[in-house]
Image (cartoon, coloured by chain):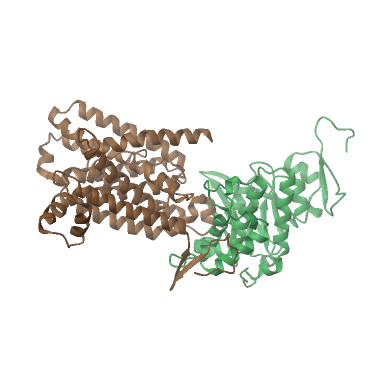
Chain colours: A brown, B green
Amino acid sequence: MNGTDVNPSVAPGVRLGRVSFVWRPWLVLVTLLLAAATFLVFCLSIGVGDFPIGLSRVIATILGRGEQVDEFVVMELRMPRALAGLVVGIALGVSGAITQSVARNPLASPDILGITGGAGAVAVFLVTVSGGTAAAVVGSVGLPAAALAGGLGTGLLVYFLAWRRGIDGFRLILIGISVSAVMEAITTWLLVRADIRDVARAQAWLVGSLADRSSDEVEVALRCTVVLVVVVAGVAFQFKPMHLGDDVAAGLGVRYTRVRAILLLCAVLLAAVAVSAAGPVPFVALVAPQVAMRLARFPTPPMVASGLVGALLLIGSDLVARTALPVTVPVGVVTAALGGPFLVLLLVRANLR
Amino acid sequence: MAAQFTTEVETVPETGGEGGARLAARGVTVGYGGRKVIDGLDVAIPPGVITTIIGPNGCGKSTLLRTLTRLLKPAGGSVVLDGEDIAGLRTRDVAKKLGLLPQAPVAPEGLTVADLVARGRHPHQSWLRQWSSDDAGVVERALTMTGVLELADRPVDSLSGGQRQRVWISMALAQGTDLLLLDEPTTYLDLAHAIDVLDLVDDLHESGRTVVMVLHDLNLATRYSDHLIVMRAGSVLAQGHPRDVITAELLHEAFGLRAAVIDDPVGDRPLIVPVGRTHVRLDP
């Protein structure tokens, strides 16, 4: 550490070889604690089930030092679900952190910007209108792919509709809400005129669930998320001044239109990947960055912490959905129950100001 | 302290032409969606002094400032910075030469003064080198010069309007450029705080910087500038030292304002006394 001759109020820096950055002990501590908590809940989620496995045995098995008996249950049966929770949670958390930062508004999450709605509409279209036959032919790959395409398409549509000599956060949200409403209307219309068996299947998917994930599906989502998070990390430095507004960012040498387009595309893709893997799980992308901001006492949504809170929230909610309630419910029911009041709280706080 | 700070300023070789101006607009035409706001305007910013752009609402003063800083791309003509067309320079290189404070900027809630001013170092940083002891030193000197060092840990949104403006100017200072462009730095400030901020701008000029600003208040512009650019309807009506430029005729021509121009009892510049329809004892 250096900078000892400088006033303590000015942030001290850390230097590791040629790399240097601002030293923020509290943010680092909170992020590490969140990572530890996420790992703990991840292992707990694997341990819980008809054949309970203790925490230490789960950890030993993950590290490859477990017993043969646990090996199959942990790695084959339960790993895909837990991993899906981790990947989808991180994707939603980071996606929400990006959209909220870009729009400079805590309400701007992929749910509200219509990305999840669009993914849902296209997926339901595939399940119902194609009579289920096409879906059956395409198999399990069909639904996630359709959701991905729907989410991406709707995200781009919202971006171009909101474009008027630049992107304004408030207009982005208003257009997003409108497009979201249209997508939900289409979904409802499709469900009303569809065959009742398809409706049941579509409904189950629309709530958002981590159940019955195949390891192939999870692997695709994992790879996409890793690539996207790396891209986000690469652009994040250029994004720092953009919290101060477009003009200030431009004055500080940032080509903000390009940086914002790349980041929004990443956010849309992350949300679409998440929806394709677990269905439109509501509110995680909205809540996670806000919780991360408050825990880290940071003025803007911290990316890494937001992703971790997203994972913690999703795996935790799934755990509650499976164990704490008298009947097993999809994880989307729990996140909606948690997220709804949180949204009201955000709106009330915004109104008080 | 001011002299110490000038060492941070990058020295750039003088370029010929336009009376040694480092920043100039040559025949720029700027418009919003087909409507021309500025048409074929030529202007050179004299080095080492405070230049203020004045003019009636909607005459294109902010548009000119935004064009000079490359926030707006002219439809015709060019802006020249150190002898090069600004449109051909890298955004980052422009940011190393030219500091900009837009009109009424907003910081995220909870961002501290030190963090905000630290963002001014962005053009000098990279993905790997995000913070160095040089940066910390420059930020501390910028905070000291603007008199907000003791506020370093406070959130920007908890400060008064005048303090907040000092902090933003501090950020532009941390950028380490000797060209500073300020778009209405006194917006939303009461007279006492406006004077306070303009005194600070004068300190920056004294320490060797070239300042360009847009101001609404004519008397403040006259008091604090060495060079006035008077605009009307997208073109330059007059420019020069306030003593040479500010006359009753010009004010009538530019603003449609009837006014008396008298000697400033406390300063060495003219003072504008507006004449309205009512509450006037004698016709000038």
The residue located at (75%, 43%) in the rendering is B253
Q: Is residue B212 left or right of residue A79?
A: right
Nearer-the-camera pick, B46 or A268? A268
Residue A268 picture location, percent across and down: 33, 47
A348 above or below A253?
Answer: above
Residue B210 picture location, percent across and down: 68, 62
Nearer-the-camera pick, A137 or A319? A319
Q: Is residue A171 left or right of residue A45?
A: right
Residue B30 visible in rendering: yes
Q: Quadrant of the C terminus of chain A?
A: top right
Q: Quadrant of residue A176?
A: top left
Residue A268 visible in rendering: no
The residue located at (58%, 62%) in the rendering is A8
Q: Residue furthest right?
A: B282
How many marks are shown on the rendered structure? Answer: 0
B69 above or below A197?
Answer: below
